[in-house]
Image (cartoon, grey):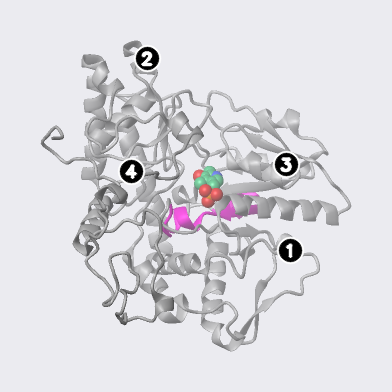
């Protein structure tokens, strides 16, 4: 007999639970394998009867329901607890967004429906474009890119088209070391070579850091503001001026707009092109929860390069304009992930201008509250006020042999999803926390209390932390092996 232990045993695979013949439903007139019994007339025609599938698991319906319900209860979700993942803005997705997006007229609209039947959807998309223009201060938006990274690629292609139209073809893009990893990747995809600009001990880019690298071969500077250290790039205005003087454009990675929307506008700093992450800032589901959306916003004189089709309005009639000679072309199927635009529009409409500003205030307040509580426990390499997220590390735990990964794994035992770890790369052993505005004070305190307990354990009982997690269905995984030698097929 298997060793009996209190507590919940790990959920077996459905294949391990199954027994041949255990299925409770059977088509009358068929045998256990689902084939017609000799002499019997099955209640379904023969061609609808399933042939044998090797190893197909058979279970009673109740067992199937219990198996999947137990699995669903192992799921960690924003509906059960906070996600402190830095650089992800894992805010709560208000249910009203879902209610609006599942209206049959929107959810079941076919992309090839006649234009007359698409008017409402196009009006909504157009209103969202206007809202994003208002928030960014920029002049035109395309909702097509399907993720932040695709927005970056689209933006870089627009910048390329701009230079080419002026008879130039500079080849370099400058990216501060505090930028997101997708930035250099998007540059490379767009055919540029990226050059990393180191940032000093302040953690923000200065015009002096940038000056030596600015030349006539620079197409753009790609900057994330607030940056991935959670710091506002306070020299952004003079940086934009210097970049423009060199004949280059400024691309803003706007994935961190949750910290600043409603308070300051990228266009006012001098930004030329940017993307938004609807699935971060505007609460559309992400992280396995839904497709992304990374709209791109541009200054007026770059609008002619936006991807086709562009939503146009003749009087009262909306249409999709494909006749755009200077367009960089098509970047995604149809008009992007439209259902995300619906959710984002619902969210922005619900908040209104005041709510948008209050949201970023609360996000910054929550992050600073957690930073204040955590900085007594972990090392804070860039002290001072943060924006929507804070980056700490494991320097103080080194003496006990405890690393960021150990503490992140131990958080699982305390019922919390770990924060982002080992990113950004410029902070060794980074522990990057972004609570978002969704979290109430008592959850922030519970998270900080858990971290206080773990930091105490790190000195009193380092083995406990080093071998965590202890209470999860699977313990510490060999992540390198899991990635390199994944087991993707169950063999009986
Ligand atoms: C999330 C993020 C991205 C990438 O967005 P995706 O939608 O995941 O492609 C880019 N830059 C920053 C700063 C981000 O936080």
Residue 374: give x, y in percent of width and height: 31, 30
Is 275 inside the magenta-drawn segment? yes
Magenta part of the chain: 265-286
Check disc 2 and report the residue beneath it: 398
Mark 1 close to ligand 1, CB under 8 Å: no
**N-term mark: 4 or 1:** 1
Find the distance from the CA under tag 3 to the CA under tag 2.
Answer: 41 Å
Separation (CA) of disc 3 from disc 4: 34 Å
The image quadrant that residue 454 belongs to is top left
Q: Could you give the CA–CA distance between mark 2 and mark 4, rounded to whole angstroms?
A: 28 Å
Residue 49, by quadrant, is bottom left
Please identify the residue farthest to the front as the structure is shown. 39
Among the two numbered marks 2 and 4 on one chain, the one whose residue lies closer to the N terminus: 4
Which tag is nearer the camera, tag 3 or tag 2?
2
Q: Is residue 80 visible?
A: no
Q: Is residue 415 left or right of residue 379?
A: left
Q: Which mark is residue 243?
A: 3
Q: CA distance from mark 4 to mark 1?
A: 41 Å
- Residue identified by numbered label 1: 329
Q: Residue at x 72, y 41 (%)?
A: 243
């Amino acid at each position: 007999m298997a060793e009996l232990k209190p507590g919940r045993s790990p959920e077996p695979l459905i294949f391990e639970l199954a027994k041949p013949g255990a299925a409770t439903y059977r088509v009358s007139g068929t045998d256990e394998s689902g084939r017609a019994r000799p002499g019997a007339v099955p209640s379904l025609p023969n061609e609808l009867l399933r042939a044998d599938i090797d190893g197909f698991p058979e279970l009673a319906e109740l067992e199937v329901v219990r198996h999947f319900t137990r699995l669903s209860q192992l799921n960690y979700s924003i509906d059960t607890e906070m996600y402190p993942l830095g650089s992800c803005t894992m805010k709560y997705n208000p249910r009203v967004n879902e209610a609006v997006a599942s209206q049959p007229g929107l959810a079941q609209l076919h992309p090839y429906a006649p234009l007359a039947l698409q008017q409402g959807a196009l009006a909504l998309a157009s209103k969202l474009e206007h809202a994003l223009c208002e928030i960014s201060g920029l002049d035109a938006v395309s909702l097509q890119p399907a993720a932040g990274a695709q927005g970056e690629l689209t933006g870089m292609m627009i910048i390329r088209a701009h230079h080419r139209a002026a008879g130039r073809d500079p080849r370099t893009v400058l990216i501060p070391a505090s930028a997101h990893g997708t930035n250099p990747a998007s540059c490379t995809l767009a055919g540029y070579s990226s050059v990393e600009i180191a940032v000093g001990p302040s953690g923000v880019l200065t015009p002096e850091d940038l000056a030596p690298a600015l030349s006539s071969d620079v197409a753009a500077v790609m900057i994330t503001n607030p940056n991935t250290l959670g710091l506002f790039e306070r020299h952004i205005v003079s940086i934009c001026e210097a970049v423009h003087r060199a004949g280059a454009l400024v691309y803003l990675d706007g994935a961190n707009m949750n910290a600043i929307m409603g308070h300051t506008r990228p266009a006012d700093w001098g930004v030329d092109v940017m993307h938004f992450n609807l699935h971060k800032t505007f609460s559309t589901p992400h992280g396995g929860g839904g497709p992304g959306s990374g709209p791109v916003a541009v200054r007026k004189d770059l609008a002619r390069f936006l991807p086709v089709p562009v939503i146009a309005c003749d009087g009262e009639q909306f249409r999709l304009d494909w006749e755009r000679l200077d367009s960089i072309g098509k970047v995604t199927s149809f008009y992007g992930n439209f259902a995300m635009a619906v959710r984002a529009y619902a969210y922005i409409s619900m908040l209104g201008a005041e709510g948008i500003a209050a949201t970023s205030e609360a996000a910054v307040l929550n992050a600073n509250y957690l930073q204040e509580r955590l900085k007594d426990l972990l090392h804070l390499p860039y002290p001072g006020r943060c924006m929507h997220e804070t980056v700490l590390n494991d320097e103080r735990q080194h003496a006990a042999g405890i690393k960021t990964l150990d503490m992140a794994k131990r958080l699982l035992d305390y019922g919390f999803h770990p924060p982002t770890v080992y990113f950004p790369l410029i902070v060794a052993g980074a522990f990057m926390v972004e609570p978002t505005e969704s979290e109430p004070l008592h959850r922030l305190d519970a998270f900080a209390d858990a971290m206080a307990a773990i930091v105490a354990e790190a000195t009193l009982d380092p083995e406990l932390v080093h071998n965590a997690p202890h209470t999860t269905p699977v313990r510490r995984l060999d992540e390198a092996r899991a990635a390199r030698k994944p087991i993707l097929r169950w063999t009986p």
